[in-house]
Amino acid sequence: MYLSTEAKQELFAKHGKGPQDTGSAEGQVALFTTRIAHLTGHLKKNKHDFSTQLSLQKMVGKRRALLAYLYKKDIERYRAIIKALQLRDIIK
């Protein structure tokens, strides 16, 4: 797999509450963002990989739903994760 266990723990430690906190919305958004970036690079090389394209679209939808949840629940956490991951503010 392209993302090792240590890399995932580091990602969750940086954006979540700790390396074992894999369920927080911030950690999940960070993991989805990393996976989306990886799949985007793959699709730039393999334009006709439609199953990966579908998976990417589903992942973007899941990330958007988590961001919408954070926006409704705690706008400060939403703004912090948007700024940390350098994402556009998609919730209006």
Image (cartoon, rainbow, N blue to C red):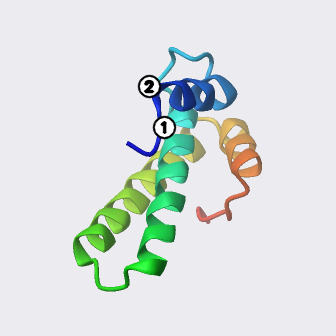
Q: Is residue 48 left or right of residue 91?
A: left
Q: Quadrant of residue 52?
A: bottom left
Picture coordinates of residue 53 (x, y %)?
32, 73
Q: In this view of the protein, can residue 33 be seen by the observer? A: yes
Neighbourhood count class around disc 1 (C-alpha, 10 Å): few under 14, some 14–19, many 20 upward:
many
Q: In this view of the protein, can residue 68 be seen by the observer? A: no
The residue sitting at 49% across, 59% down in the picture is: 38
Q: Is residue 16 left or right of residue 63?
A: right
Give 90 or 33, whichever is nearer the viewer: 33
Picture coordinates of residue 80 (x, y %)?
74, 41
Secondary structure at badge 1 equals helix
The residue sitting at 75% across, 45% down in the picture is: 84
Please give the label number shown on residue 28: 1
Residue at the disc numbered 2: 23
Q: Circles 2 and 1: CB distance less than 8 Å?
A: yes
Secondary structure at badge 2 equals loop
Which tag, 2 or 1, sits closer to the chain's start?
2
Picture coordinates of residue 44 (x, y %)?
48, 79
Q: Quadrant of residue 14?
A: top right
Tell me which amino acid carries mark 1.
Gln
Tell me which amino acid carries mark 2.
Gly
The residue sitting at 42% across, 75% down in the picture is: 43
Neighbourhood count class around disc 2 (C-alpha, 10 Å): few under 14, some 14–19, many 20 upward:
few
The residue sitting at 68% across, 36% down in the picture is: 77
